[in-house]
Amino acid sequence: MLSSDAAFQAIEHSGIMAGMRGNFPPETALRVCEILMEAGINVFEFTYNSIQPIEGMTAVKKAFGDDACVGMGTVLDVSTAQRVLDAGTDFIVSPAFQPDVVTVTHNAGVMMAPGALTPTEIVSAWEMGVKLVKLFPIGTLGVDHFKQIRGPLNHIKYMCNGGTSDANVGDFIRAGATACGLGAWLTGDGTMPLETIRLRAQRLRADVEDARAGFKQPMVRA
């Protein structure tokens, strides 16, 4: 299990959190994560409402150790949080801001990225000591919406999730996002061809690096 600081640093360094929702049992999860790591993405969010999420998470962590930052998303209550903490999760992510889940996660020394969208939720989460606020669902609202939120709240670190793809990840990073989370577009539901995942991961890696460098090179979109 990574410390809270180490998990945040891994997410910040990567700029991409690859989510897996659907059919990602250990054998599938290992193949997908190996492809992602070869493409330069090493932060993985399993989702609790998937098939064998804890088994997939623990298998990947056992295989790659601290070379991978492996956590659990869609954690909606304290009992679920405790279960994944007991399983050794590196971080917890939620689509919602629930103070009791944040508290139990922080008490275990683990990083929590709660979901929030309104300024009140964002500030309330930040005041609890969260290192990263998951803006969700922000992709469908657009980069301009994110800029308006971040304007008065630019002291807070954000991960942009929901409706994210190669079409907007670079824009969110340029606008100040620490990272972006991607699930369906990047990894599918467990049946996406591995070569498609590889190509999309490589594209995202380039998008993030270009955005952080302050420019965007033309790319052919498949």
Image (tube, rainbow, N blue to C red):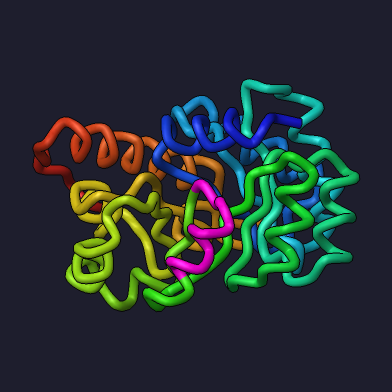
Please identify the dominant SS of the magenta region. helix
Compare residues 134 and 34 and report the one nearer the observer: 134
Q: x, y (%) of residue 167? A: 25, 59
- Quadrant position of residue 7: top right
Side of 134 relative to 2 (left or right):
left
Residue 143 covered by magenta stretch: no
Q: In which quarter of the image is the N terminus?
A: top right
Q: x, y (%) of residue 174? A: 19, 47
At 77% across and 25% down in the image, what residue appears? Answer: 63
Compare residues 173 and 222 and report the one nearer the observer: 173
At 68% across and 31% down in the image, what residue appears? Answer: 3
What is the magenta range?
122-131
- Quadrant position of residue 108: top right
Side of 177 relative to 87 (left or right):
left
Q: x, y (%) of residue 183? A: 52, 58
Side of 27 relative to 92 (left or right):
right
At 59% across and 73% down in the image, what residue appears? Answer: 96
